[in-house]
Image (tube, rainbow, N blue to C red):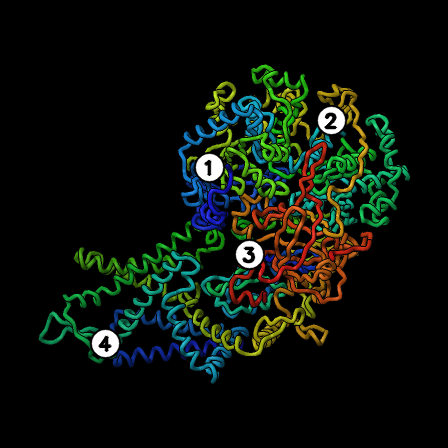
Amino acid sequence: MSKESLKAMLWGLATAAVTALLVVAGSRNLAYFDAELIAYTFAVLFAVFAIAYRYSMWLQRPPTALYWKRGWQVFFRRRFFLPNTGRWFLRVAGDFALNRFIFRRGRLRGLAHWLIMWGCIVAVLITVPLSFGWIHFESVPGHLRDYRAYLFGFPTLAFPLHSGLGFLIYHALDFAAVVVIAGVMLAMRRRMRDHDAASLQMFGEDFLPLVILFAISVTGLMLTGSYTWMKGYAYDFITILHAITVIFGLLWLPFGKFFHIFQRPAQLGVSFYKDVGKHEEKAHCRRCDHAFTSRMKVEDLIKVERELGYNYTMADPASDHYQWFCPRCRRAMLILAQSALWGGIRGGQPIVTAALPTLPQSALGIPHIDFGPLGKEDEENFHP
Amino acid sequence: MALLPVDCTAILERFGPHLAYSEGLRLTTGVEPDRIVDTHCCFCGQQCGIRLKVKDNQVFGFEPREDFPFNQGMLCPKGVKRYLQGSHPDRLLSCYERDPRSPGGFRPLPYERAIERVASEIQRIQSAYGPDAFALLSGASLTNEKAYLIGKFAHMALKTANIDYNGRLCMVSAGAGNKKAFGVDRAANPWSDILKAEVIWISGANVAECAPITTNYIWQAREFGAKVIVIDPRITPIARTCDLFLPIKPGSDVALFNGVLHLMIENDWLDHEFINSHTAGFNDVAESVKAWTPEKTAAVTGVSERGIRQAAEWWGRAKTSFLMHARGIEHHSHGVQNVLGAINLVLASGRIGRPGCGYGTITGQANGQGAREHGQKCDQLPGYRELNNPAHRAEVAQVWGIDPRELPHAGADAYEIFRKIDRGEIRGLLSICFNPMVSLPDNNFIRRALDKVEFYAAVDFFLNETAHHADVVLPSALQEEDEGTVTQLEGRVIKINKAVDCPGDARPDWKIVQDLAHRLGCERGFSFQSPREIFEELRRASRGGIADYSGITYEKIEKQNGVFWPCPDEKHTGTPRLFEPGSWNPVAQGAGPFYFADGKARFNVATYTPSAETTDEDYPVILTTGRVVSQYLSGTQTRRIGPLVDQYPEPRVEMHPRLASRLGIADGDWTTVESRRGQLTLRAQVVTTIRPDTIFIPYHWAGSQSVNQLTISAQDPISRIPEFKVCAVRLRKTPSTGS
Amino acid sequence: MIHLEYLDRPHSVQTAPVVCMHCDSPTCAEVCPADAIKRTADGVVQAARKPRCIACNNCVLACPFGVPKMATDLELMMKCDMCYDRTSVGKKPMCATVCPSQALFYGTEDEIERLRPNSVPVNRFQFGDQTITTQVRVMAPKTPAVEYVDVTSSLNAQAIGQDIFFNILEEPFTGGK
């Protein structure tokens, strides 16, 4: 076993162990733990182990490790800490709560993701504490129609079962399921119709997660349907079916597309890294002399590339490393290098000017369209 | 009166050009088309195959058409974005008449009322001033069917001598030169012959921007070992990697051709066998080029002797070759002489009529070839027949069922029509598919002439800048809204297929013309129900003519992916290569491969005369004009397509740093360019890719950005093509507050 | 999704089209902290996976050919993925299909051998001490034969063009009073 895997294994085991302890403690030594839900609990424990394992493996990759470290460093950098904290809230709201960047990719696409995401969040917030025995409900003594919710065994609010609030709490999972199904439908529609999606999608990576979410939601709704309108018809069978779908989903969490739930927050670290980079020293392209990114970024990339086994070192000390060249000049050098091979064979010759090679210019008058940079940041990569 | 009804900005606000970008259906990636229509690009003379994707009567995208042999899927930026011209916000959806009180200066008008009004104005003007007082201007982007019918309409319904078309600005010098030398006006070879050529000579053709797909033919030939010679005052993309580049002084091409022929004779790089048995007139030409020593040629052309000798040697010693030229040598007051000089080089080498031995002019407009064959040219009848030839008149009159005496005689060319308007000889004007306010030279004169015309009706799908002056505007069909045939630059007749229906009150030009004919009391001969019926009559009318289409059918075009004319009978598969040894044509009747009674090609003495306006102390710089890759002709379509405008948003003055520094002009500076006829102010583009004594401005723009405010209306005495490529200007830096 | 630029418009009309070269060992994918860039079994390096890309810009800056672009507002890197939607159903990529000069070409080795008899495809590129091999080839002359394209050696190279003065007959020229 490699060092990385061993470390990851330990992280996985530790995280799973802590979770198990929390289950025991949160349910008051299993006093409120529903033994029928034991399978769920073990599935969660496995998922926690595997996610922590994979997360740890992921964090040990050189680029990720570096961002992880830098992300925290820059966040807490004294000069930036307060503004960073403010921005953290804005970004969590905009990117995570509202999924704004996905809506920009496509309205229906954003809506699909937003529905699925919030449906799942609500469902997880309810079911996990329930199955761990962290929350349970008891009827209020003397008021048989009233229920009281207990969190970690401590009494919290009470509510009449047949009130609006009661209905909402009692059926919260059903609502979540409906929201998830709506999102899944939208996502499916796109995957069936969209040519872009069609060319790249794979069953395991793209359809299976939707199928799992759909199955969990539908079997969950069938439970409600069974006891509400069908006098519990096939209730046990549906319970088992539902358990199977949920447990399959839990076991799938660390492997497939669902893992992006845990990777995606890295986006936040990246955004702070970029913010700080903007305010600090720039890297200047060693061909065209334009600033194109932060010096920190170039130096970090050089380090990461070396760790990954790339050696873009250049013999000329003034150039030092290929990472000191902006993307635009890289493209120019590629074409010029090919042209050089044809010197004296095809017509035309290198132009003779006293000036240094000029910057390549967009062949189009106005960028952004078709060939130009894709936005403000990209303009820096293109350094207009 | 054709003064603008309201302020120009109000017209532009209402009728555009506005920019169309992909949105809605066109951006959605999951749309299944209702159908995919195999057709052709609507722009240049190459007529690349393209497949249009249609849903809900809208062209929403395209697919490359790899099965079409000419372009095999390749397209230039214009072709890639052509689908954006449909469903455009500027599209004319009803007839309009001028009304200064309406927004944009025009008020919608029911179609029948519009036809009624145009017809009654025609009748009023013709009865008051005679039939020739009403003139018709048409276009070379129209299908053969439309071109044929418009010619017939002018000659038979309007009975006016004054019909001409915008090919006058495009193909006529090459056409006249070809007629004089070969007796027929068509590219002599299919483009596939370029691939087999050892030397490719390109004179005055910005191939990569104006005929982009031809680049692949030339570069492919180069891969097979061909040498490429480019003659151009600018280092165009095709010139950049050519093997010999001669930066010629604009207007001196004929001198270069004569100088090269001089060297060919001197070194005996001639095909005597071919000259003796297949040509006539060589001795006169040989005599005429005696004076064109390399020294003299160099002095006139501004090209070094070394370059001239190198070109002559490569051309002279080649086993196979292809010579092509375009507007660069044709847009001159001696454009025909330039073309004749080029053809003399081809004839002296004897390299024509065989595989890999070719010659061709690069047609500019969509139907630059076909539209010049079927009778919308001022001196012409269908089948490339001549209006002043009694036999030709009789042949066509018989097909049309009229007395030859009813046919008018040759009339004025497109520019002369405006001079006649200015002189009061022409009082009424109908334009179809023509935007002279952008495309004719010295357009300040054109505007003054338009202001004098009593009645002007314009037919177009967008309100072009000339139509701003119209009394009545009739909305016509886009290329994809009708079917028909077009003859592309190789002489290949191809089929345009209908993809969508016309929106609103718009309708194909042939229907508008027929409705007008009916209202003018001319029902007979104008009762076609479809383009196919018109084509059937065109086939009959062209039978026995030089441009013989009688064996071409829509089915044959589809089956063979195009048919090269002449195609004299149903079993004939067409004639990709002209002048093959032993070939038959209706003029020579077997006497030889060329279209003269003796079957021999003609050498013509090509006389050098300086351009009409040469530089002097007051106007020391040569102005030349041309195109950019993302725009097409007067821009009526391409200035409305967002991505194409973004690619080259506004015209710039291209000048050499040596000139710029002398005038204190830096790249991007506002620069005023002034000729004896007008001035305009544009940003400078300072580049070393142009002769220092020459500036270049592309001509696709209108109004204050139109370079044709400066150009000169001098015309070739034979072809009547205007001299777009040379005039004298001066320029100065404009203070930064400038426009 | 290609790049198209003038290399040095003031002096030459040379344009530079650059598509993704589809490296055998893609630096962009390796430096991606989010595992967002995948290489398919047939060697196509795909654009970033949308759920994973965190818009860190590593790929844009690390790609030796300068290919990826960053759409920050979408939190997404975009680049040429060899028109996977077209190539996976047997069509050519759009850019190579429509390219009017076939500077971009897509086809088999036999086809390129027939069409460019004096050229050979090369897929090894040298960047300082690093060699990169790619799926996309550039055409090099057959003679003199080259093993690889030394990109960084062209650091100070100029664009290719013509010298307007080479064959010009210079005469006294006044550009205005």
Q: Mark 1 and mark 2 in contact? Answer it, CB < 8 Å.
A: no
Q: Please, which residue is most extreme toward the bottom here?
A: A78
Q: Position of residue C173 (x, y in %)?
A: 79, 55
Instruction: Give the alpha-carbon distance from disc 1 to disc 2, as whole Å.
Output: 40 Å
Q: Nearer the viewer, mark 3 or mark 1?
A: 1
Quarter assignment of residue B170: top right
Mark 4–mark 2 Cα distance, whole angstroms, equals: 105 Å
SS for dot 1: loop
The image shows residue B424 at horizontal and vertical percentages of 58, 32
Which mark is in front, 1 or 4?
A: 1
Question: Callout 3: 10 Å neighbours few (<14), some, many (20+)?
Answer: many
* Pointer 1 chain: B
Q: Which mark is residue C81?
A: 3
Give above or below for A88 relative to B142.
Answer: below
Please state which amino acid type lies under the numbered disc 4. Tyr
Q: Residue at x 61, y 55 (%)?
A: B682
* Cα distance in 3D space between marks 1 and 4: 70 Å
Q: Do badges 2 and 3 share one subunit?
A: no
Tag 4 near tag 2, CB within 8 Å? no
Viewport quadrant of the C terminus of chain B? bottom right
Q: Amino acid at mark 2?
A: Gly
To which residue does mark 1 refer? B500
Residue that carries the numbered disc 2 in the rendered image: B183
The crowding category of the residue bearing disc 1, from other C-alpha atoms within 10 Å (few below 14, some 14 to 19, many at least 20), is many
Same chain for the residues at labels 1 and 4, yes or no? no
**Closer to the observer: label 3 or label 4?**
3
- As rendered, which of B207 and A238 lies closer to the eye? B207
From the image, tell me which residue sits under label 4: A32
- Pointer 3 and pointer 1: residues touching (CB < 8 Å)? no
Pick the residue in front: B362 or B523: B523
Q: Secondary structure at mark 4?
A: loop
